[in-house]
Amino acid sequence: MAKTEETLLIKRYASRRLYNTETSDYVTLEDIARFIREGREVQIVDLKSGDDLTRQYLLQIIAEHESRGESVLPVGVLNDLVRSYTTQATSVVPEFLAMSFDILRDGQSKMMENMGAINPMTKMPGFEAMQAQQEAFMKAMTGGIMGAGGQSAKPSADAEAENLSDIKKQLAELQEKLSRM
């Protein structure tokens, strides 16, 4: 993820309203989620106490997406995360998750670079469909943040349903691996 600008500071007022210090206007959680999907780093602080509330608000954004049926995290993974707060694994889980997403982002960037370069695979029949499927998967896993490779292709409804099925299968496999740890 490329940092194109410095961290966007959002201040929370006593009224719980969120104020964008860059544009001098109030924002919603959905606005903050959009900033993040666009590649911005965001920090949310309480105006009065100065406490950093970023983690709390990011978790709230994830919870809202999950409650609207935009599920990315299977119930088993959520259960494992809750368990990790009550076990000695708390020091390992955050590092593991951070490393996993770093690897995913790095892999996505390298894959997009390779697909963009002169590559004999680009002449292979069905390559564009495979590329669109991979981009949709990466977009779903990274919350829509695309690497230096550019824009993602808009897959058809059938392709999206198939992609979702594949993603759920891959997440279930990841959950199984996590539960074995």
Image: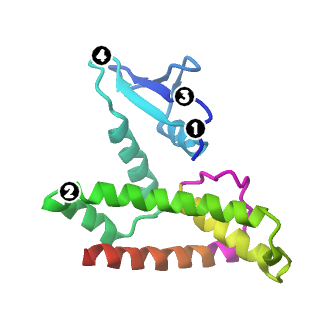
Secondary structure of the residue carrying tag 2 is helix
Q: Quadrant of residue 153?
A: bottom right
Q: CA distance from mark 2 to mark 4?
A: 31 Å
Most extreme residue toward the right is 123
The numbered mark, 2 or 4, whose residue comes first in the sequence reads 4
Q: Which residue is mark 1?
A: 3
Residue annotated with mark 3? 6
In space, the residues marked 1 and 4 are separated at their CA atoms by: 28 Å
- Side of 158 where 17 appears, left or right: left
Q: Please name the residue that numbered disc 2 is placed on.
A: 90
Closer to the chain start, of discs 1 and 4, is 1
Which residue sits at x=33%, y=79%?
176
Q: Which image quarter: residue 23?
A: top right
Residue 92 position in % (x across, y down): 25, 59
The residue stretch that appears in magenta: 143-161
User: The residue under label 1 is which amino acid type?
Assistant: Lys
Mark yes or no: residue 68 visible. no
* Residue type at the position of mark 4: Lys
Q: Is the residue under label 4 in contact with that under label 2 (CB below 8 Å)?
A: no
**Residues at marks 1 and 2 touching, judged by CB atoms closer than 8 Å:** no
Model colouring? rainbow
Q: Does 75 sit above or below residue 96?
A: below
Q: Secondary structure at mark 4?
A: loop
- Secondary structure beneath dot 3 equals loop
